[in-house]
Amino acid sequence: MIKKSRQVRDYKLLDKTLPTLRYVNPEEVFIHLQNNRCKTYDIFVKEGDHVLLGEVIGMRHGGFFEQPVHATVSGTVGKISKKFHRTGRKVDTVHIKNDFLDTMHESVVDRSIEEIEKLTQDEIVEIVKEKGLVGLGGSGFPTYIKLATKEKIDTVVINAVECEPYLSSDYRMILEHPGEILEGLKYIMQALNAKKGLIAIKSKKTPLYQILSQLLNTRYKDLNVEVAKLGNHYPQGWEVEVFKWALGIEIPHGQLPMKYGVIGFNVTTAYGIHSAIRHNLPVYERHFTVNGDAVKFPQNIRVRVGTSVKKLIEISDGYDTLQKEVIVVMGGPMMGTSTVSDDVIVSKTTTSVLIFKNVEYKEEPCVRCGSCVYSCPAHLEPVQIMNAVKRNDKDVMKGLEAFKCIECGLCTYVCTSKIHVTDYIRKAKRLIG
Ligand code: SF4
Ligand code: SF4
């Protein structure tokens, strides 16, 4: 049941002017051995072993790629147990008790600027693969596969739109680490021999424009990069919308942007690429938003991958109501996943946790108002797809191109009758698979 996109309402706003308040170095981490893209894995360590920060402790296996698993603290390996992933599924995790020494693995050594300047596309791809970089905005798609493209790329676009309500961890990360993001973009442009770079932000985020422009006019003036101010609406951060409004290029459904000479990376991924190339570091920490009307102290936190969300709620002064009266959403209110428990673990691709007071909405019959149709960014007819699902008419679902749905949640959000329309469209996608 999609409850989350009903929850975009008046709330105690997390003040974006607050710096990322804390760096959480937890007593223990639980590293996911599986995720939505990787069902099987090998583990290279056993209970009682001592591991170092950045050490490869396992390998996840996806359909067409492999993904190394890194220790995000130094410490002692514990048991394998099942914990919730941000997708709402329970998956295997390996426990590491932190020794708080942060002893780095020998592979984590800085690369000099001169060495970096000589790196070829293949070498950059190999580093990014070894460090397990994936789309850190939530897609989880292996970054090395995108970077290995042989298409001619003119423009690299960094997607820093962060369009879902309540989220501001990217905003704070850009303000606090603009240089690292521009370095990451520079390395991507070097790998792809791209002549131009572009950072897409929401137009209302003036401080981001100011800080990025200042650096681009001084330290990075030789880098051919612009900041594009896009709309403030949702889902402006959808990559197709970003290319359309930033570059005037419309990418048809099912086609890759690379065919059009452009490629996009999430801003957190650009930051991660900087860490991988410059410092040989895997993604061992990330910026993370804790927000919502049922948590006492909403804040942005820099957190180790593998930290328990329960711990983050605890250091945010806990729930503002009885725990049984809240819903926990991993990710944004529109596209995130409601979970039944706060026993969730922060993965590389987890951007946020939102804690809402649960409000039950009564679903009414469809009044054929058409709001879902007018709002759909993929130009679908959600109400008709919903009716086809109710009739189990797969031909109509296919004819109405339900597979083009990006699961943005808008049809549920706007529905006059409070119907969970997105759930029906998801079901249609599964049925016509
Ligand atoms: S969830 Fe899918 S069908 Fe609904 S508005 Fe978004 S893209 Fe359209
Ligand atoms: S928005 Fe809701 S009530 Fe209106 S047509 Fe769509 S499903 Fe029906």
Image: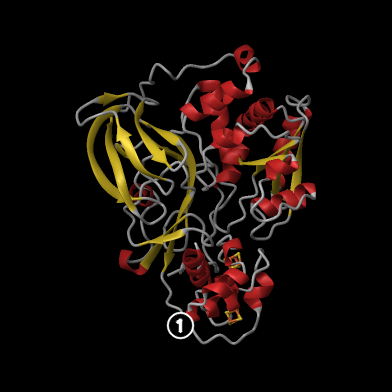
Query: Picture coordinates of residue 97 (x, y %)?
Result: 26, 33
Determine if residue 208 is in view.
Answer: no
Q: Quadrant of ligand 2?
A: bottom right
Q: Position of residue 60 (x, y in %)?
A: 38, 37
Against 194, residue 412 (above or below) is below
Q: Nearer the viewer, residue 61 or 313?
A: 61
Left or right side of 176 for 87: left
Residue at the image point whose x is 34% and y is 62% from the top: 340
- Amino acid type, residue under disc 1 in the picture: Lys
Please, which residue is most extreme toward the left here?
48
Residue under pointer 1: 362
Residue 39, position in %: x, y?
A: 36, 45
Say which element carries label 1: loop
Q: Is residue 66 above or below residue 92?
A: above
Q: Residue furthest front?
A: 395
Question: Would residue 326 appear left or right of 157 to someone viewing this image?
Answer: left
From the viewer's perspective, tell me whether residue 27 is left or right of residue 135.
left
Q: Quadrant of residue 278?
A: top right
- Residue 28 lies left or right of residue 63; in this view the side is left
